[in-house]
């Protein structure tokens, strides 16, 4: 499998994005969205926020405020694939804790660097694992979302199938 590296956006790419959105309504939001989208690890590093602040002539506190207000923005590197395990009551009673442990075993990590199991990214940046309080699909619990696709009534076998399919995916050229 490939390994994603943490390469920051070049100054030219950043300038291009900023110029594209300059003067438009909601320019800070749309600029940050595109900057994050273009980052190979789908996040906004502190240095990038500083650069955006300087280049757009917007106070850093305002840029940081937007980046932390919207849950869409990530301040930490994200894996190529995202697995979200629901830890709400309905899913918990149907075994979501065991599924979370299964995911950890499959991606090869037990806990995040801070010891929590609510969000972590593997060292090769291929997987980010998160939990959510409820997907609003309790009748189909336990629920797991993989790369934006919701999977219901998940059990270990089903999870293994999904994860194996992803692990076998060829990297896009
Ligand atoms: S508790 Fe998992 S979807 Fe509601």
Image (spheres, rainbow, N blue to C red):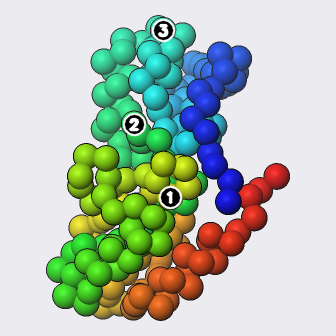
Within 10 Å of the Cα at label 2, are there few (<14), some (14-19), or many (20+) other Cα atoms? some
- Spatial distance from mark 1 to mark 2, Cα to Cα? 16 Å
Judge whether residue 136 can be spotted in this image: no
Q: Earlier in the sequence, mark 2 or mark 3?
A: 3
Query: Looking at the picture, how far across and down is residue 111, in whole percent?
Result: 31, 58
- Spatial distance from mark 2 to mark 3, Cα to Cα? 18 Å
| Residue depth check, mark 3 versus mark 1: number of the one nearer the observer | 1
Viewer-nearest residue: 115 or 84: 115
In the image: residue 103, left or right of residue 112: right
Viewer-nearest residue: 64 or 40: 40
| Identity of the residue drawn at 57% across and 35% down | 6
Judge whether residue 27 can be spotted in this image: yes
| Residue depth check, mark 1 versus mark 2: number of the one nearer the observer | 1
Identify the element where label 2 is drawn: loop
Are the residues flagged by discs 3 and 1 in contact, CB closer than 8 Å? Answer: no
**Which image quarter is the N terminus in?**
bottom right
Residue 66 lies, with reference to residue 136, above or below; the image says: above
| Residue depth check, mark 2 versus mark 3: number of the one nearer the observer | 2
Q: Earlier in the sequence, mark 3 or mark 1?
A: 3
In the image: residue 140, left or right of residue 31: left
Q: Residue 75's mark?
A: 2
| Residue annotated with mark 3 | 54
């Amino acid at each position: 499998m490939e390994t994603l590296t943490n390469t920051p956006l070049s100054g030219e790419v950043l300038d291009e994005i900023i110029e594209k959105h300059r003067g438009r309504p909601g320019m800070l939001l749309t600029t940050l969205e595109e900057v994050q989208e273009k980052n190979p690890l789908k996040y906004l590093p502190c240095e990038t926020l500083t650069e955006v602040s300087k280049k757009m002539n917007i106070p850093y506190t305002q840029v940081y405020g937007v980046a932390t207000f919207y849950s869409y923005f990530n301040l930490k590197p994200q894996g190529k694939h995202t697995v979200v395990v629901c830890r709400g009551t309905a899913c918990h009673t149907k075994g979501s804790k065991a599924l979370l442990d299964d995911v950890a075993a499959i991606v090869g990590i037990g806990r995040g660097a801070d010891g929590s199991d609510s969000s972590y990214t593997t060292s090769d940046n291929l997987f980010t694992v998160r939990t959510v309080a409820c997907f609003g699909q309790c009748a189909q619990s336990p629920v797991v979302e993989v790369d934006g696709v919701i999977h219901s009534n998940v059990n270990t076998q089903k999870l293994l199938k999904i994860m194996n399919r992803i692990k076998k995916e060829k990297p896009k050229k």
